Image (cartoon, rainbow, N blue to C red):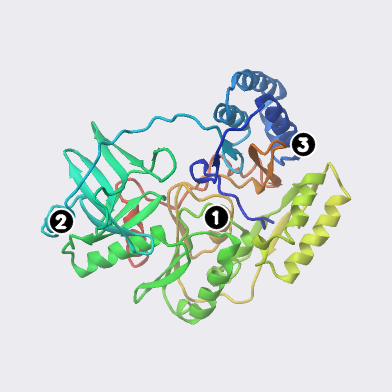
Amino acid sequence: MRFFLIITITFLFYPIHAQKKTCNCKENYEWTKKTFEKNDAGFQYIIDKKGQETYNNHNQLVLKKVKAAKNITECTEALDNWLKFFRSGHIGIIPLTIETQKLQKKKLRKWTINLPQFEKYISKKTEVDYEGIWSFGSGNTKIGIKKEGENYIAFQIDTTKEYPRIILSITKDNDTLNTIYYAKGRSPYKIPNPKLIGNYIQFGEWGKWKRLSPVLEVNKKNLNNEKIAFNCLNSKKPYLEELNNTTLYLRIPSFNLNQKPAIDSIISTNKEKILKTSNLIIDIRNSTGGSDYTYREILPIIYTNPVRTIGDEFLSTELNNKQILDVLTNPRYEAFDDETRKEITEFYDKLQNRLGKFVLAEKEINIRTQDTIYEYPKNIGIIVNHKNVSSDEQFCLEAKQSKKVKIFGTTTAGALDISNVFSIESPDKNFKLIYCLSRSLSIPDLTIDEIGIQPDYYLDKSIPEDKWVEFVNNILNE
């Protein structure tokens, strides 16, 4: 049972308030340690694995850093270091405030540009690089990128301003690029370096831009491949697309519960078409987890034989049980049907009767069977990468038991054994602690944490990720 919403731990983009606030790091360390030791489902497993003496030594080393911490930033580093003793995924300490401090800023000279002259120059450009006029977001915002020496300056195009606002700089240091974003009202910070995909530019998961000028001459096939690659890496909503007469492509950007209605609708609306098509590609790259409940409607389509899943057991504590009960009133989980809500209520009562113990959520071994085995699709390729965690990995474990399914990509992130993520704020409101409520009965015999799930087809670095769909399509059609 992995029915809770996974919290994506991303320090760079977590909403924080730049204000001066006192932080007693020792008190926060003691609170973090006490809360985690009592409530995290994976705590004792790691102590048994690594040993109490090793843990004691780790505590002493971290305590020295805690006592030396002068601000929230240094305290965050110390607390994060303490948590890393246990695992790398489904865990974290997030600062909710930061001290006002002088951060190193890249100084840019006062910058002007003759916009009509720049637009004329760009329209005649034939060399393919970052220079050009781009759009992002809804398409209403235009960005110009101009090359200066070996570097590039990106600026927001506004014909009413003589001095355009510089948005980012792309500088070259030897063979390394450094991309700095200049946001209003905050210090500059690094973002992923840009990658050209035909008429698109991609900054990792940070953002996507579309080229407006110059319009590059590309043939229809390449243009279609560019569009597919761009959409699959950037779409925030699931969608189904026909690649050719024999292959359908289903993109699922996340298994979060808020995606379930859209996924179910796609399956329901296109079920007849799916069941008449030879090949199906399911692309779940960069999903970062969610809920097992979200992918339920996909499983019957790919089924060939009984599917075995291993149960989870939850650590019953007052804090953990309250977290579970809160699910019933939290708007995030409105996608749960009445039957699931009834199961959660009954499970809460069961937990309350066994405080301090691990409680099995369902059965030790669950076997799912169904009467219908569909002839089509005959071949199913699931595309994954190193960002896939938790429910993504559970989906792969269930799906790959079908004789029709092969996994393509790279090893997944490896964050499944200790799961059902929740968070709690520190008493002084400076931090949010991320921890887990359950552990899988599959450990240690089948360990996913820190290891991940190996693909059946490893897509090595010679195959650019924006070409993965094309590669899998070719394999399935051989």
In the rendered image, residue 180, in percent from the top left (x then y), is placed at: 34, 40
The residue located at (17%, 60%) in the rendering is 214
- Separation of disc 2 and disc 1 at Cα? 43 Å
Query: In screen coordinates, is 234 left or right of 198?
Result: right
Marks 2 and 3 sit apart, C-alpha to C-alpha, by: 61 Å
In the picture of the structure, the residue carrying the numbered disc 2 is 122
Residue 56 position, x and y percent, is 70, 21
Q: Is residue 345 above or below residue 190?
A: below
Q: Residue at x 64, y 45 (%)?
A: 417
Q: Which of marks 3 and 2 precedes in the sequence?
A: 3
Mark 3: which secondary structure?
A: helix
Residue 308's image quarter? bottom right
- To which residue does mark 3 refer? 38
* Vertical arrangement, residue 279 with respect to residue 101, above or below: below
The answer to whether residue 130 is seen in the rendering is: no
Please give the residue where the numbered disc 1 appears in the rendered image.
392
The alpha-carbon separation of the residues under discs 1 and 3 comes to: 28 Å
Q: Tell me if I can see residue 78 in this picture.
A: yes
User: Looking at numbered disc 3 in the image, what kind of residue is underneath it?
Assistant: Lys
